[in-house]
Each structure stands twice: as structure tokens, then as C-alpha cells.
Amino acid sequence: MTLEQWIEDGKSDAYRRKLPELADLLDGLARSTAALRAADWNDDAARDTHAAPVPESEPPSP
Amino acid sequence: MTTGETITTLAPRIASGELRAERLTEDALATIARLQPSLNAFITVTGDAALADARKADREIAAGQYRGPLHGIPISLKDLIDVAGIPTTAGSKVREGRLAITDAPIVRHLKQAGAVLVGKTNLHEFAFGTTSEDSGWGPARHPIDPTRSPGGSSGGSAIAVATGMSIASVGSDTGGSIRIPAAVCGIVGLKPGWGEISADGVVPLSRQLDHVGPLTRSVDDAELMYHVLRGETPANLHDDRESLFGIKLASLDGYFMDRLSQDVEAAIQAALGLIRDGGVKLSSVSLPHATDIAPIYLHLVLADAAAYHATTLAERPHAYTPNVRIRLEMGRHVLGEDYVRALRGRDVIRSEVDRALAAVDALVLPALPIEAPPIGAATVPVKGGQEPVRSAMLRCTQPFNLSGHPAISVPCGTTAAGLPVGLQVVGKAGRTLNLLRIARAIERTVNRRG
């Protein structure tokens, strides 16, 4: 499900249940979900999969 | 507010018979009676039972049956911890009138240690918030400025300890709910490593992120409580010769230090200066995926809470406070695929915290970026503009709920208006006692300021 479809469904549900405040909060959740999905450690079936549970990343600096 | 009597100073006087537990308990109950109308720290006060327990403690001690440093000490519990025969409201009308059937294991340990329960404290409803203003029993209020929040969700516990309504308290911490109120009320709050203290008999918010721990007036007291809550006999505390000399610390910079309120930044920098002067090798470090922490945390806590509340939310939605109800409703919209992403992200953050700690003994950072916010505020000023209260309050604490590392907030000064500021110290996984040793040295160093 795309984020656009998901937020549309969620807001429709919120308005149907007379919870407009929920619709507002879902906008914030959608932004957070977009950030989560954009993270570079997410799995991608088209890429190599790391065996380790945590992907390589730059060590904490310095 | 960490001045005044502590478990560590009171226990020898009680053990020797110089101070009676009954007198100490009467003082605590009198303070509750005086301050409860303005601060709303308690949901249930167990005055008669507390006095009976205190008299029993006095009799046992007079008979040579001293149980240890908590014997006869008035304590309070966040009202999401089960005590047999007393309601566990979790700050919600959803649970009004339901009595707990059995003691939580931590309560059994406290009773075995002879602690005297004076009551159960107010909290953000179901621990689902950082301000303690959304409670079925009305907002808890800051002990210095009642127009402000005492932090949350263990707000009532922090008020009780800061004011002497109890000498120590026990809270829970899912994203910062021990450390945040401890910091803004000027006391010590310990979130041990995940699973070190039993959360059985404690109303959950997110079982994978929930931690149980003490709120106290000193690091020494936090260590005593830590042992008792684990069912252990308190060990002898380290002596006054402990210092910071030779300890390696790293300040967690970037995301955690960039957007502080002006006064908090000044207090934190002053504390770090004193720590450096104390002989610490202080470096700086950052977490590569720090900006992913809030989205990871949000998806886990929302979905976990929604699952726990699903039945009640469907059947009695209006029994919740409006803000908590809507946040629970939001959790029902988290998709399974995003929850799985968040679980993977938690592993990434845990690994990065481990790596940040690899070359040092502990990390230091603010407990929270702001001072106690006004009750009802939606946003607060930080460097660079305004920020929603909730995200600002959680920013520095929630990483260590994801990672499970032990973390403690220690008072480190005040703002110009006299509101307390807390410095957070984070230890290596499985090394809570070492964290307490470092925190004790920091407490002594920072409190020596002129």
C-alpha cells in the first residue's frame, strides 16, 4: 500500500467516525512513516541482503 | 531539591531507634495533605495502612529485626503498579474501581524490605504521554511552578520525591517517563537496562520498551532501590573517595544537543565543564541514524499500545481522556510492514549506541532539551524555533528505550527561573552498577559548583 492510499483511507475512516482530530494526527504519522520507509537500513528485495541484523554504516564519529 | 533527607541518611537513624518510622510516615502524610490540593500528585493515599506498617517496622526494629535500609522508609508507587487490595487506575477512568488481586513482584520485594507505602501517584493516562496533564484524575502540577508540568508520565512520583511526600518512588519508563519527570523536578531517575527489574504486575504501554525503576533524591538511593526492586540485598555503597578522575565519557552531540532551550544549554555546558575539570577525558560522539529514532519509536509504541487497548477502545472510547484516546486510535493505523521496519531500525539504533560506548565508560547528554513546559502548551521554544512539546521531551531519552541501555538523570543546575535541569548518563549494556558509580561521581562533582 502506498502512503498516499494509506493516508486517504485513514482520514476517510476518521471523518466517518467523527474524529477529525485523528485525521490531523494521521498527517503527522504519515510524515513519520515516510521517514521510516526512507531510512537507508531498510531491506530491499532487489539488493543484496546482509546476513547480519544490522547493515554496515559509518562508525560513530569521531 | 536533592538537599534534605535521603534513604541513605535516614536509614542509620531508623536502625538505631533515634528516628521512629511512625514519625517519618506522619511527616510524609502531613506533606501530602498540605500539598495535594495544589499539586495533585496522588491518586490514592494509603494513610491508615502506612501508619500501621510504620508502627510494625518500629516494633520489629526495637526487637532487633532490622531488615535493611528501606525498613520504615515512606515510599510511593506510580499508580500502574499492582498492590493487592488497592486500585490500579493507570491514571484512567477505564480502570476505576478495579482492585489489584496480587502484589507485583517489585511490591513484594519492597514489602519484604520493610518499606512503608504511603500511596499511589498520578500519571499521564496509561503512561501514554510526557506531561502528566492528561489523567483521569486531573493534571499533576510542578512543585516549583504549578502552572507547569512536572513531566511524565511518572509525574506524581517525581513531585512526591521532590517535596517529601515520600522519600522515594517507583515509576515506569517507556520513552523517558522516569528520567523526564526526575529531570524537570530536580531529582534522580534511573531507567535500568531492559528486563533488569520485573515489569510483571505493571500496566504496560509497550512491553518491549517498558522499563521499571526508581525516582530518588540521590544516586545512592537509586542504587539501594535498584537492588531491592531486583529482590537483592543492597550492597555496601561506594565511599566518598570516588571521583571522576580517569573516567572516559563522551557527550552525545548533533541531534541531541542542537535544539536545546537557551537555559538548558547553559546548564548542561556548565555541568560538562565541571566534569571536565574533575579529571574526565570528555570526547564527543554522534549516532549516524539519530534522526531515524523518533519514527522508529513512534511506530513501535503506537502499535503496541493500540493492541493492548483495542478491546476497551472499541467498547468504552469515552472513558479515556480525549488526547490519549486519539493517540491510541492513531496506533490502529500503523501498518504491519512499517512495524517490521521499526523493529529492524531498533536493532540499528541498539548497535549504534553500543558502538558509541565502545571506547568510553558512559555517554552524557541532556535528559531533555527543555525546562518544565507550561501545562497546556502545544509547542515550546528551542534553538532554531518552536517544537512540539512531546517530540522535544522525548528526543534525548527514547533512544535508550529502543536500545535497552541503562540510563540515569542527575540534577545539574537550574534555569534562570529556578527550574531544574537534568544531565543524562548512559551506561554500557549490562553494566548498570558501573553506570551508578559514574553517576554518583558526577552528582558529587556537579553539586560542588559554587
Image (tube, coloured by chain):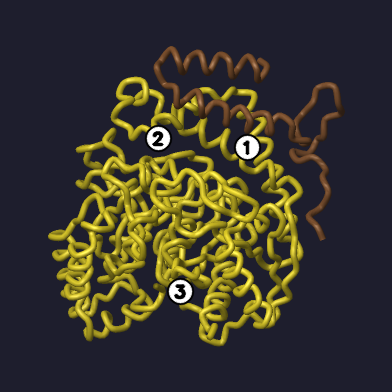
Query: x and y percent of residue B244 in the render?
Result: 63, 79
Relative to B95, residue B239 above or below? below
Sequence-first disc among 3 and 2: 3
Q: Are marks 1 and 2 on the same chain?
A: yes
Q: Colour of chain A?
A: brown
Q: Nearer the viewer, mark 1 or mark 3?
A: 1
> Residue at the spot x=31%, y=68% of the render?
B163
Q: Secondary structure at mark 3?
A: helix
- The residue that disc 2 covers is B324
Q: Chain of mark 2?
A: B
Chain coloured yellow in the rendered structure: B
> Residue at the spot x=46%, y=67% of the render?
B420
Question: CA separation, marks 3 and 2?
Answer: 35 Å
**How many callouts does the rendering have?**
3
> Residue at the spot x=71%, y=48% of the render?
B351
Question: CA separation, marks 1 and 2?
Answer: 19 Å
Amino acid at dot 1: Pro
> Residue at the spot x=69%, y=82% of the render?
B279
- The disc placed on residue B322 is none
Density class for disc 1 (Cα within 10 Å; few <14, some 14-19, many ≥20) is many
Amino acid at dot 3: Asp
Sequence-first disc among 1 and 3: 3
Q: Is residue A26 left or right of residue B61?
A: right
Tags 3 and 2 in contact by the CB under 8 Å rule?
A: no
- The disc placed on residue B220 is 3
